Image: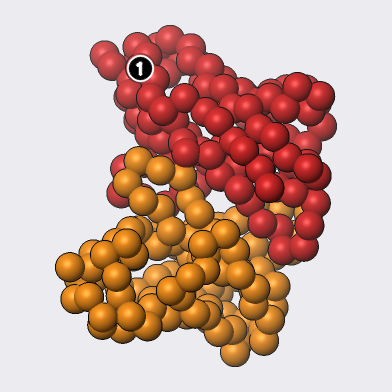
Amino acid sequence: NAGVTQTPKFRILKIGQSMTLQCTQDMNHNYMYWYRQDPGMGLKLIYYSVGAGITDKGEVPNGYNVSRSTTEDFPLRLELAAPSQTSVYFCASSYRTGGTDTQYFGPGTRLTVL
Amino acid sequence: GQNIDQPTEMTATEGAIVQINCTYQTSGFNGLFWYQQHAGEAPTFLSYNVLDGLEEKGRFSSFLSRSKGYSYLLLKELQMKDSASYLCAVREDNAGNMLTFGGGTRLMVKP
């Protein structure tokens, strides 16, 4: 299993540009998440999904959109990039909620908006 | 909502023991996780507590007191490779298995 994969690893955007961060998991997990991590800070939840076709907002959703058309993929869309969106973005997945079920993280996408 | 506090930085010596504390306030506690994150890498799962007490996993142990809203991660026989950030995360009893993370504690292990 590759686990959770993310592309690209690095990206530089100009203000106002758009892009999609890709996330794929091959563990047949129902739950998927997008986090951002600013330098020296913890993770903040942007959006999450409990299954294909179902998404919901997390703590910091403004400026982002998601979709979940398949169990495996959970892309994150930035429509009008702003400097405040400079961050490291992590995608994660888990099989279900509750118990010891932990989240598995992808390697991250480092995004800079200039 | 939740409020999770942990020290920003700690320094310890190779071979020693270090304790990283985490305090939290939540309306519906449903588990506490510790993750390790090396610089430039993704977080990886270390431990999980939902009942009061100590969970031991080799050199790492995690303790929880639900009544005090308090947890700690204990690292024994420190090694240089333990230099990393340690993230405390709390799960609330709502849908989605959502975790709220603290700011992380950056641990530096010195020779």
Q: Amino acid at mark 1?
A: Thr
Q: Nearer the viewer, residue A33 or B103?
A: B103
Where is residue B97 shown, x and y percent of the image? 71, 58
In the image, is residue B69 above or below residue A79? Answer: above
> Number of labelled discs?
1
- Kindly identify the residue that appears in the image at 40 percent across and 71 percent down: A6
Where is residue A17 shown, x and y percent of the image? 26, 82
Q: Is residue B90 left or right of residue A5?
A: right
Q: Residue furthest bottom?
A: A69
Q: Which picture quadrant has residue A107?
A: bottom left
Where is residue A114 shown, x and y percent of the image? 17, 68
Q: Which picture quadrant has residue B90?
A: top right
Where is residue A103 shown, x and y percent of the image? 60, 56
- Kindly identify the residue that appears in the image at 47 percent across and 25 percent down: B7
Report the chain shown in red: B
Report the chain shown in orange: A
Residue A93 seen in the current view: no
The residue wearing badge 1 is B11
Other residues around mark 1 within 10 Å, as few (<14) / some (14–19) / many (≥20): few
Q: Which picture quadrant has residue A88?
A: bottom left
Q: Nearer the viewer, residue B56 or A38?
A: A38
Name the image colouring: by chain
Chain label for disc 1: B
Q: Is residue A69 left or right of residue B81?
A: right
In the image, is residue B10 above or below residue B66? Answer: above
- Kindly identify the residue that appears in the image at 43 percent across and 58 percent down: A36
